[in-house]
Amino acid sequence: MPDQPDQPVRDALTETLAHQVLGRLADVQGPYFGEFGGRFVPEALIAALDELETEYRKALGDPAFTAELARLHREYTGRPSPLTEVPRFAEHAGGQRVFLKREDLNHTGSHKINNVLGQALLVKRMGKTRVIAETGAGQHGVATATAAALLDLECVVYMGEEDTRRQALNVARMRLLGAEVVPVQIGSRTLKDAINEALRDWVANVESTHYLLGTVTGPHPFPEMVREFHRIIGEEAREQVLDRVGRLPDALAACVGGGSNALGLFNAFLDDEGVALYGFEAGGEGIDSGRHAARFSGGAPGVLHGARSYLLQDDDGQTLPSHSVSAGLDYPSVGPAHAWLHDLGRAVYEPVTDDEAMEAFRLLCCTEGIIPAIESAHALAGALRVGRRAADDGRTDQVILVNLSGRGDKDVATAATWFGLLDDEAAQAAQGTEGDK
Amino acid sequence: MSAATSPVGTMPVASATGDRIAALRAEGRAALVGYLPVGFPDVERSVEAVLAMVDAGADVVEVGVPYTDPVMDGPVIQRAAEAALAGGTRVRDVLRVAEAVASHTAGRVPTLVMSYWNPLLRYGVDAFARDLAAAGGAGVITPDLIPDEGAEWIAASDAHGLDRVFLVAPSSTPERLQRTVRATRGFVYAASTMGVTGARSQVGARAEQLVADTRAAGARDVCVGLGVSTGDHAAQVGRYADGVIVGSALVGALLADGPWSARIDELQRRTADLADGVRRARGAGPVAAGRTVLAVDDSTTVDPTSQETSP
Ligand SMILES: Cc1ncc(COP(=O)(O)O)c(C=O)c1O
């Protein structure tokens, strides 16, 4: 497909035609989402990606596969995850009704397990014996190590050296689960470098190994496949809201790192025109500071890790470092389906700063007794903003559905430091400054 | 002999690299393609190093654009790229290398730019092709661009008369080999092994079969890279391939400790050893007889990733 950098698909005729040809937005298949996506990877990986695509399509059509995945969701993960109304929190959101989709209550503490179980079952079908994964905060690494233990797979997790220090407890968790954690000591030593290292491993070991990618980024078929394994979030939530409220929500709010929890929630509502979709990116210390991970506010279309999407980059196309208080949102690119929804105008993406996210984090803790992941706190801050804006426009009857993508156990040390809740000695101990050794 | 031309495209486009390989074939040997990144240890000295490599026997220059996320490269080239970026190297600096090589060799030695895709996308694909052609460059090697995604590059390289070197791997199916061969001009880059760049003690066992399969898919010129490090490797690969591509072993010479002049000497020693290898391969060249084969110290350049993670 011809590339047209920096040229958003805004042409009305194109949109209409696309809609007619493609039917429902929710069913769009890769490799391209509009002009985003694709396969910008070494030729050496193409055979494996082709095999993966074939196997995944076969599996989704195989009742034995879908039944086994459904059984694991029910008996292992604890699905369906509940929908919780949060009225005391909602008082701060312009008086709207706010509901949380409780992915934080899943086994391993976040939505990540949905995708991991799906891919791990695929690995068994493909007859591979080894999985590798990248992780930033450690949530995807923990989920992958968990599934590997459950399904008897060898597991290696690549993690930036910087992150192994910041998230020492999750390193220990992965090792308890039997995974090997490899600290990556090149580049910025964070998530993007962990992905580079995982890709290098994959090229060298592709015959025995599956790269269990943790979000809706990467080369085709990952963006589409990971969306398929997460669409259950929105499908459950749609029924739960209809059941509880008797109508569809007015707005959805989700945080967007790579974009898997957001796309999982959005997908069931993409073709409901009356439902507004909001994705919240990490605004870090503010867009003007340059220290953020807001790809739509501060990035431009480009190619990273196999897909064309929005990207933080300099004038030379070199990837710029991202920044966020939340490791899970700290990534310089974003899934191509979000780039497509952004350019179509179907979803709106806004930055939420570290300060706003931490305020919302604290608010949910003390109004509802729920400690959210700092990633999810970005969605909560966004919901507060959306609710207040509607109230300013004179509407106080809005129903806002927030994806609470994960729980905050892993973030207690960060929050304690942020809010000054511990004395110096205890704070140091909590941060685990001695690293992962 | 007629000029090498592209098998695809609306018009036949001459290939500077293809012509060079054809001329060497007539001499009875494979080409030595030598890789160095621009900007290591700085732009000035990287130009000097490339010219020294040419003087020591490289037939084709491959000059790398340093990139923040080089997923096809092992630790040696990563380290050099990281240092080049830290020193402020820009994409446009490769044009200086192409110019310097063209004027130093009166156009005899073609320069191919090796670049990951995003830097060229950001520069502007057509603009880069135009500027590279104007600088006397021969074409581009694109390690993370497959022909399926290459429409814009294929058009730009046709418009500006540049070679486009795509890669094939031991995992490539016959259909993909054909597709890649059809889209390629200059030579097809055959990855000797499933893995990233980095010197290895042996050349991948699947390389020879891959070259044969790539020829069966219609390629005339096939060069082998990844893990080719020594004169003996070059002699072995040069028997069946049209070119031998060497990167990490040469970059490793520049990464070593010691004064710059000593590192350049080592670079030239390694290049000469490799140049001797391609001449020994088919027992053709006169150089083979008198030249000593120097051992390359592999210990500094062996890629630990590929060693550790191999099952
Ligand atoms: C709890 C939680 N939410 C969100 C994310 C961001 O990922 P994504 O945007 O793919 O949902 C992460 C990533 O680590 C996470 O752990």
Image (cartoon, coloured by chain):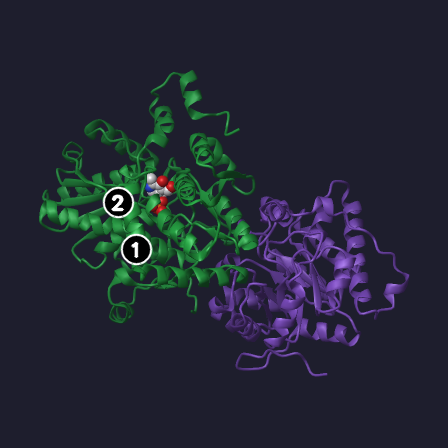
Chain colours: A green, B purple
Residue A158 shown left or right of residue A253 in the figure: right
Residue B273, horizontal then vertical, whole percent: 80, 57
Residue A99, horizontal then vertical, whole percent: 18, 41
Which quadrant is the N terminus of chain A positioned in?
A: bottom left
- Per the rendering, the mark at residue A214 is none
Is disc 1 in contact with disc 2, using a CB cutoff of under 8 Å? Answer: no
For the point 78% across and 58% down, the residue is B232
Neighbor class of circle 2 (other Cα within 10 Å; few <14, some 14-19, many 20+) is few
Q: Secondary structure at mark 2?
A: helix
Residue B42 shown left or right of residue A290 in the figure: right
Residue A33, horizontal then vertical, whole percent: 35, 62
B213 or A276, nearer to the observer: B213
Of callouts 1 and 2, which one flags the residue occurring earlier in the amino acid sequence? 1
Mark 1 belongs to which amino acid?
Answer: Thr
Q: Secondary structure at mark 1?
A: helix
Neighbor class of circle 1 (other Cα within 10 Å; few <14, some 14-19, many 20+) is some
Q: Chain of mark 1?
A: A
For the point 43% across and 44% down, the residue is A148
For the point 87% across and 68% down, the residue is B286
Q: In this picture, is A226 found above or below A169?
A: below
Q: Which quadrant of the render holds ligand 1? A: top left
Residue A371, horizontal then vertical, whole percent: 27, 31
Residue A390 shown left or right of residue B275 in the figure: left
In which quarter of the view is residue A96 placed? top left
In which quarter of the view is residue B87 placed? top right
Can residue B290 be seen from the camera position used here? Answer: yes
Residue at numbered disc 1: A66
Q: Chain of mark 2?
A: A
Could you tell me how far apart the alpha carbons at marks 1 and 2 are, in whole angstroms? 12 Å
- Per the rendering, the mark at residue A74 is 2
A356 or B197, nearer to the observer: B197
Q: In this picture, is A101 found above or below B30?
A: above
